[in-house]
Amino acid sequence: MAKEEAIELDGVVEEILPGGQFRVRIEGGQVVLVYTAGKMRKHRIRTAVGDRVTIEMTPYDLTRGRLVFRHRGDSVAGQAGAPARRAYRPRR
């Protein structure tokens, strides 16, 4: 029997939980519990509340998923962005 294909959905991070888990609201309004994929942990990709993300879900359990991608610069909360970083100044 062939392995079932994963379902990819886009959503927005609503809450950060301990252990690399998040609550994500997907397009249909449903809230899903997701965990960070191994590649994201390996490369230390940080995810904050309000970030747009892509998740993968199995067709067997539609309440859990795996966070596989964080969209760069597409934050729903805080559209103004972070404050500018200070320029590097060498010591005198």
Image: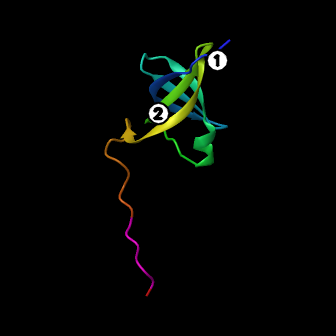
Stretch in magenta: 86-91
Q: Is residue 1 magenta?
A: no
Residue occupying the far left of the picture:
80
Quarter in which the N terminus is drawn: top right
Give x and y (percent) for residue 20: 63, 38
Residue 68 place in picture, x, y as percent:
54, 34
Q: Which mark is residue 91?
A: none
Q: Residue 25 placed where, x, y %? A: 47, 24
Residue count near mark 2 (Cα–Cα under 10 Å), binned few <14, some 14–19, many ≥20: many
Q: Residue at x 42, y 20 (%)?
A: 27
In the figure, is residue 9 to the left or right of 64?
Answer: left
Q: Which label was assigned to residue 53?
A: 2
Q: Quadrant of the C terminus?
A: bottom left
**What residue is at 49 percent from the left and 41 percent from the top?**
48
The furthest residue to the front: 1
Q: Residue at x 45, y 27 (%)?
A: 11
Report the mark closest to the observer, 1 or 2: 1
Quadrant hosting residue 91: bottom left
Quarter-wise, where is residue 57 in the image?
Answer: top right
Q: Earlier in the sequence, mark 1 or mark 2?
A: 1
Taking 22 as reference, is 81 left or right?
A: left
Q: Secondary structure at mark 1?
A: loop
Reading the image, the residue beneath label 1 is: 3
> Under tag 2, what secondary structure?
strand
Q: CA distance from mark 1 to mark 2?
A: 24 Å
Provide the major secondary structure of the magenta segment. loop
Q: What type is the residue that disc 1 sits on? A: Lys
Task: State left or right for residue 49 relative to residue 57.
Answer: left
Question: Where is 59 relative to 87, above or below?
Answer: above
Amino acid type of disc 2?
Answer: Val
Which of the 4 quarters of the picture holds residue 34? Answer: top right
Badge 1 density bin: few <14, some 14–19, many ≥20, Cα 10 Å: few
